[in-house]
Amino acid sequence: MLSLLIISLVAFASGEPCDTESYNSELLLSLTKNLLRSVDTQDGVPNPSVHLALRLSNHHNLAKENEHLNRLKNNLHSDLQNSLSSSQSVTGLLALYTLALKSSCYDLNTITFTVGEKSQTLLTHLKNQMEQEKEHIVFSHRPLTNYYQYSLGVLALCVTGIRVNNHVSNKLIKAVEHEHFKHGDSESIDTYAMAGMALQCVKDSGSHVQNASELDTALAKIKENLLAAQRTDGHIGNEFSTGLAIQALLAMGNQVEECAASMVALRTDARSNKYHNPMAISQILPALQQKSYLTVKNKNCLNEDDTLVLEPIEPVEVLPSETKVAVTVEVVTSNGAAVVYTVGVPKGSSLLAALDLLKGKNADFTFETESSLWGPFLSVVNGEQARQSDRRYWHLSSDGSALTEGIGDFKIEVAQKITIKNTSY
């Protein structure tokens, strides 16, 4: 694995032909297999983003994909039904569910939810959610959820052939114009990317004719921001936003060649197992195959390759490290008060495991998590919540640098200070 990484880095630095076609194909096949294996091991509800990426892949195991589709229609559908019945805002998840079903060429008119005694189709519920989001922007200058989910909603409606209300798309255009895509103090590259794909779909549909110039201006600004966010190492934003950024650039007509710095950076990270989280793989796999979520619009599900076979893998027992590293954990509450803890954890422990150890050793430290498509995230620390409804979240950093991975994925390899801060956005 180290030799593969060195080869890729040398190619990136030298400007020589980046990789052979067979070398790239081997990587894509490996990523698709890893994603397919994840559907049998993932916790909680099945992930529609994973299904979407599998359906956009060049290689298929149609039987396994159909199994996952059935889980989506049962387990995820039931979870969404409960959320809608309790009036929760689930725009992003509804949109991803829509895209996943569309990618399997499923008849969306047969998917319904019953709220109260009224049964309506999935697309009707998604349109209703978008109207609620739009009205919230009118009165509060922000969506009920966030602009990433709002963009997903516009995209899902558009690729399924539903005409997006001009008032809904205009709110997204204005958000681009006024630079409202922030996460904390930084610009959210993920949101710009999703908004780019959504607005490009609206443009391609030809339905947004009243403000065509404003739409073009917004798309140009998104493209400019994405290109400006490219780092010297090729990543656009960070390692986990690059896949969506490439998808957006492709969707908006940019040529992102196999040897482009951003593509080389993705492949380098993939070969070094940076993208072991299924959600991360689901976002980079389409990009590495020069596709975007807009590809779903014209998918016909005919004559698909069905040769992907999963070889059995012997389970590997990972023994806990005997080497301990010291971790300092600082918790900063919403009023600025800070408390500091220390704990020794086995080298290679996840941050989640480290917090569990700290919780077991210190009765003053408590935390709770909630599940997401990216894995568990902190919701309550020392009794204080950081709720989306209050526009707050727990910002995590290591020695002052913001974490790009979740608490279940980030590994503790050396002594460090972890800061957990209740932050608004």
Image: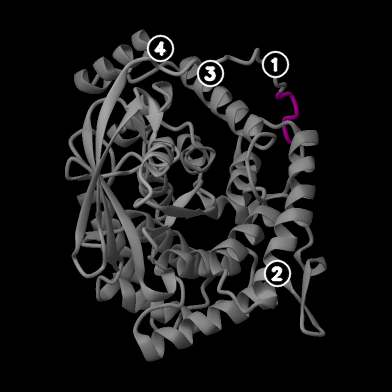
Q: Earlier in the sequence, mark 2 or mark 4?
A: 4
Q: Report the mark closest to the observer, 3 or 2.
A: 2
Image quadrant holding the N terminus, namely: top left
Whole-number angstrom distance, CA of label 3 to CA of label 4: 14 Å
Q: Report the mark closest to the observer, 1 or 2.
A: 2
Task: Name the element at disc 1.
Answer: loop
Residue 18 numbered mark, or none: none
Which residue matches tag 2? 82
Image location (x, y in percent) of residue 242: 35, 43
Callouts 1 and 2 close, C-beta under 8 Å = no
Q: Residues within 10 Å of mark 3 (few under 14, many from 20)?
A: few
Q: Earlier in the sequence, mark 3 or mark 2?
A: 3
Q: Earlier in the sequence, mark 1 or mark 2?
A: 2
Whole-number angstrom distance, CA of label 1 to CA of label 4: 20 Å
Q: Residues within 10 Å of mark 4 (few under 14, many from 20)?
A: few
**Range of residues picked out in magenta:** 304-308
Please name the amino acid that badge 3 sits on: Glu
Q: Name the chief secondary structure element in magenta.
A: loop
Q: Report the mark closest to the observer, 1 or 3.
A: 1
Q: Indicate left or right for 223 with 91 as reference.
A: left
Residue 311 numbered mark, or none: 1
Which residue is found at the position 74% from the left and 31% from the top?
A: 61
Residue 1 numbered mark, or none: 4
Which residue is found at the position 49% from the left and 48% from the top?
A: 376
Please name the amino acid that badge 4 sits on: Met
Callouts 3 and 2 close, C-beta under 8 Å = no
Q: Which picture quadrant has residue 197?
A: bottom left
Picture mark count: 4
